[in-house]
Image: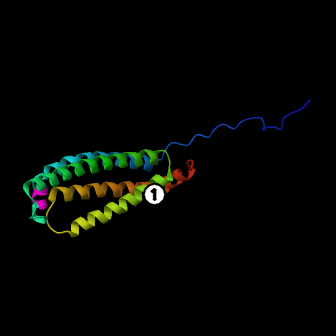
């Protein structure tokens, strides 16, 4: 009678990933705060519509009233779309980081680097934009906290142990 090789007929149990370390849990919480800040940013942008209109007129004094109005509507649309897109990115990166996807940590870091350039470019632009500038610095600080948490040793160990797909 044929005897199977010991252990050869048994299918190994799928290994369960250990729970996320505190640094990942905190990073996810911080990223959720970033998503909320992006949504609040829409409101902040809407409160600056009068200065947005004034800036459109200052940069393009030859525009008609209709063209200024159309440019203002485009700006409103961009405020809303960028806020919703920002919130979605924060949420997506948080979920993928929580799942242990190392690429999410890298993408989040690249997005933070892009935001860093944007914040410094905005600061170099000169005076003006008080509420939106303060808001952009707040979002940058949230991003900095998330990136620091994502690159801690415990986080790196967690990402190394997670599936690579």
Residue 79 in picture, x, y percent from top left:
23, 51
Q: What stretch is highlighted in magenta?
A: 51-56
Please say whether residue 26 is one of the residues in the magenta stretch: no
Q: Which of 118 and 6 is in front in this view?
A: 118
Q: Residues within 10 Å of mark 1 (few under 14, many from 20)?
A: some
Residue 24 in picture, x, y percent from top left:
44, 49
Where does label 1 land, which residue? 106
Please say whether residue 54 is one of the residues in the magenta stretch: yes
* Residue 61 occupies quadrant: bottom left
Res. 148 in view: no
* Image quadrant containing the N terminus: top right
Res. 121 in view: yes
* Residue 54 occupies quadrant: bottom left
Q: Which of 49 and 73 is in front in this view?
A: 73
Determine the residue positioned at 15% across, 60% down.
Answer: 129
Q: Which of 56 and 22 is in front in this view?
A: 56
Q: Main secondary structure of the magenta part?
A: helix
């Amino acid at each position: 009678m044929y005897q199977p090789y010991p252990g050869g007929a048994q299918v190994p149990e799928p290994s369960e990933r250990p729970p996320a370390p505190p640094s990942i849990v905190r990073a996810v919480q911080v990223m959720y705060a970033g998503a909320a800040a992006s949504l609040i940013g829409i409101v902040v942008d809407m409160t600056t519509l009068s200065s947005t209109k004034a800036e459109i007129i200052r940069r393009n004094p030859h525009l008609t009233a209709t063209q200024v109005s159309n440019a203002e509507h485009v700006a409103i649309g961009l405020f809303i779309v960028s806020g919703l897109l920002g919130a979605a990115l924060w949420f997506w990166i948080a979920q993928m980081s929580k799942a242990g996807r190392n690429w999410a940590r890298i993408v989040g870091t690249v997005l933070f680097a892009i935001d860093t350039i944007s914040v410094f470019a905005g600061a170099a632009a000169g005076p003006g934009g008080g509420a939106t500038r303060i808001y952009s610095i707040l979002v940058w600080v949230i991003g900095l906290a998330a990136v620091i948490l994502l690159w801690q040793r415990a986080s790196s160990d967690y990402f190394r142990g997670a599936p690579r797909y």
